[in-house]
Amino acid sequence: MRIRPLVADTSIAVALTTVAVLLGQESARQGWPQLDARGYGLVALANVPVALRSRAPLAVLLLVHLVWAAYVTAGYWPVVNTFAPMLTVYTVTALRPARVSVPCAALMSAVWIYAGVVSEGAAMASVVAQAIGFPLVIWRFGYVARRSAELARQLKREQDERARREVAEERGRIARELHDVVAHHMSVISVQAGLAKFVFTSDPATAHAALSTISGTSGEALEELRRMLRVLRARDDGDGPPDAPMPGLARLGEMVERVRAGGVAVGLHIEGTPRQLAPGVELCAYRVVQEALTNVLKHARGAGAAVELRYQPHHVTVSVTNDGEGVIPDRVGTGSGHGLIGMRERAKLYGGTISIGPLSEGGFAVRLTLPTSAQAASQGDDAT
């Protein structure tokens, strides 16, 4: 249980005062004057201020050393009040820079030597050695404590900064997921709503089909949003992942059919033997195709598009191309939109590469290559 600094310092001050009083009672046996009322008062003045050492370390140190010098001048046994000055030197060294603590340690040495000078029969060689050795050792312990505290604070700042970056990255990931889900499904719904309104009276069957597509698309969008919310709740509550799986490459056919229902001629071609990949890899490829087809719906509704999925030994490649027909020039992305940035971030996250840009023969292409294992990022495929 953590103890408040004032409570801890007060307890230390009481303990030091008690030890000094008990030690003072041995003064006569050591050949020094017995403590009287003045002596006990000086003992109290030298030890009780330690209770405030954390709040005013420098002031407490000066007061304690001043009282200690007065105690020595009065002719009492100097050893009685040596513990409080040692503790104040340690405290100042642990809390203040060296330019402050070094003179404080020197002050303790000076008072120690002064006590030897005014004492009869003192061995000055031993007194000087103690006056140098004790403050030096205490100063070293205080310096180490100060450096350790500084390193702990620095580590805490770095941990806080890392936590802030992780939160920002998580928010960015959630923003990309929301962008991909909402932009794609709302584009399909917008196209189908326009079609239903246009043929509502002239072609009820087509209008009914468009409304059915709207219903299915909106339901799928809501389900994906619910899945994302379940993921967030599971992380907050510490529960396991939700039961609903994340969309993957197996659902590309459903996406193509949905976009095709929106009036875009989309073809899907798969090469290689389909296999189960890591969920993150499949979600990345799925979202990139989803964003590319969403851009076709928004910017090149009259164009034909082709989705190609290629399974290779160590990589999987997906590409989305359109022939450029029906492009709305003012609405073509310049490569700096949130969707395109999200594609590049997803590819980088999973160690893949992505190319986005116009084709020489006209149209636009997005090509993503992702490694399918941890070692695949540094390996090449036999077939390229």
Image (cartoon, rainbow, N blue to C red):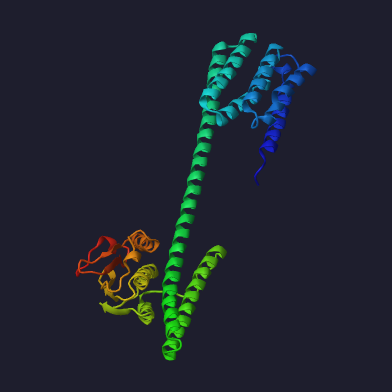
Figure check: 372 above or below 189: above
The C terminus lies in quadrant: bottom left
Camera-nearest residue between 153 and 3? 153
**In this rendering, position of residue 227 left or right of residue 41:** left
Position of 50 relative to 270 (above/below): above
Residue beneath the point at 47% across and 73% down: 224
Residue 20 placed where, x, y %?
70, 25
Q: Residue at x 72, y 31 (%)?
A: 14
Left/right of residue 375 with respect to residue 120 in the rendered view: left
Residue at image position (45%, 70%) is: 182
Where is residue 139? Give x, y as percent: 54, 26
In the rendered picture of this protein, how many numbered marks are placed on residues? Answer: 0
Answer with left or right where residue 115 lies relative to residue 267: right
Quarter of image, res 207: bottom left
Residue 36 seen? no
Q: Residue furthest right?
A: 37
Q: For this rendering, which residue is in front, 331 or 56?
A: 331
272 relative position to 76: left or right: left
Point out residue 219 in the picture as x, y percentages from the top left corner: 49, 79
Question: Which residue: 68% across, 28% down?
Answer: 50
Q: Is residue 189 visible?
A: yes
Out of 185 and 355, give the one closest to the viewer.
185
In this picture, is 299 found above or below 141? below
Q: Position of residue 3 (x, y in %)?
A: 67, 42
Of residues 284 and 361, the one drawn nearer to the viewer in this rendering: 361
